[in-house]
């Protein structure tokens, strides 16, 4: 298998899952800041020019939910997703929300130029997106609180899974939006615990990530 990833991007989610699975895979770094994702070579793999991309033999899979579901079905013994149908559906429900609501909100913070042509318009979009992003992290904080109250080790159950990796990623991004991750006590504690898992630590090391990028104004 081969994973095309960008450091700190949402591709961190399948990156940690592949490390958790423990089967050999080839990590391929895609430098978004150099627009390598828009090159003809990369667009031949994924015409949308996005990461992550998972290649397994002759099969190319894009999009977080599809990759997560594929890896879970391919390696069911690893417990990446719950086996119970309802529990699995609830994890995928939250994962979809992270991917289709929280993530795009941060995109408006980090890349407002995609949504407005003028500096003033971009500033307004960024400020509004930041105001929306904080409450979304508060919602994930509540998930971490609920898991801790139930004595549940991870957000999706008793095994590390995609919700934990995505929650860590989204909390980390909050630092770029001027949101202090330490203000979310349960979520920050959970993210620090997750970051210390050997599989996650390997992905963090490969991507050379700093978990807390918040800088006080």
Image (spheres, rainbow, N blue to C red):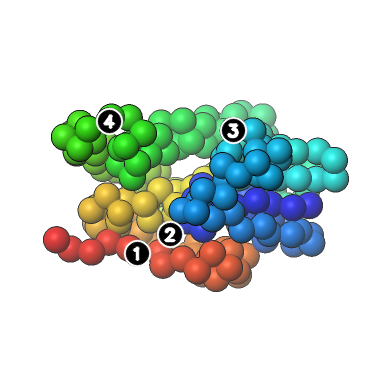
Give the labeled residue for mark 4. Answer: 117
Q: Which label sits in the foreground, 3 or 4?
A: 4
**Residue 75 or residue 70, whichever sits in front:** 70
Q: Is residue 58 visible?
A: yes
Residue at figure coordinates x 71%, y 38% from the top left: 44
Q: Quadrant of residue 42?
A: top right
Few, some or many residues within 10 Å of mark 1 (<14, 14–19, 20+):
some
Residue at figure coordinates x 27%, y 61% from the top left: 214
Question: Distance between the Cα atoms at labels 2 and 1?
Answer: 10 Å
Residue 171 on image: x %, y %: 37, 52
Q: Are marks 1 and 3 in contact (CB under 8 Å)?
A: no
Give the labeled residue for mark 1. Answer: 212
Of label 2 and label 3, which has the lower sequence position? 3
Question: Distance between the Cα atoms at labels 4 and 1?
Answer: 31 Å
Residue at figure coordinates x 35%, y 41% from the top left: 111
Question: Distance between the Cα atoms at labels 4 and 2?
Answer: 36 Å
Residue 113 on image: x %, y %: 32, 37
Residue 191's disc number: 2
Q: Are marks 2 and 3 in contact (CB under 8 Å)?
A: no
Give the labeled residue for mark 3. Answer: 48
Question: Distance between the Cα atoms at labels 2 and 3?
Answer: 30 Å
In which quadrant is the C terminus drawn? bottom left
Of label 4 and label 1, which has the lower sequence position? 4
Question: Circle 1 — which element?
Answer: loop
Q: Is residue 126 left or right of residue 37?
A: left
Q: Quadrant of residue 63?
A: top right
Q: Which label sits in the foreground, 2 or 3?
A: 3
Residue 192, above or below 183: below
Of label 2 and label 1, which has the lower sequence position? 2
Q: Which label sits in the foreground, 4 or 2?
A: 4
């Amino acid at each position: 298998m081969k994973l095309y990833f960008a450091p700190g991007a949402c591709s961190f989610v399948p990156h940690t899952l592949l490390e958790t699975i423990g089967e050999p895979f080839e990590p391929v770094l895609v430098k978004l800041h150099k627009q390598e994702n828009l090159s003809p070579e990369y667009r031949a793999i994924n015409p949308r020019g996005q990461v992550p991309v998972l290649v397994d033999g002759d099969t190319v899979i894009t999009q977080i939910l599809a990759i997560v579901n594929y890896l879970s079905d391919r390696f069911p013994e690893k417990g990446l997703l719950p086996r119970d149908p309802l529990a699995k559906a609830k994890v995928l429900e939250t994962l979809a929300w992270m991917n289709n609501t929280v993530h795009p909100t941060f995109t408006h913070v980090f890349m407002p130029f995609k949504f407005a042509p003028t500096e003033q318009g971009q500033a307004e979009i960024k400020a509004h997106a930041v105001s929306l992003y904080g409450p979304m992290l508060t919602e994930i904080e509540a998930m971490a609180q609920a898991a801790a109250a139930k004595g549940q080790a991870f957000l999706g159950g008793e095994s590390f899974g995609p919700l934990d990796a995505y929650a860590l990623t989204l909390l980390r991004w909050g630092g770029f939006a001027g949101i202090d991750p330490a203000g979310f006590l349960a979520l920050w504690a959970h993210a620090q615990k997750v970051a210390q898992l050997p599989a996650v630590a390997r992905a963090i090391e490969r991507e050379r990530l700093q978990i807390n990028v918040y800088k006080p104004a």
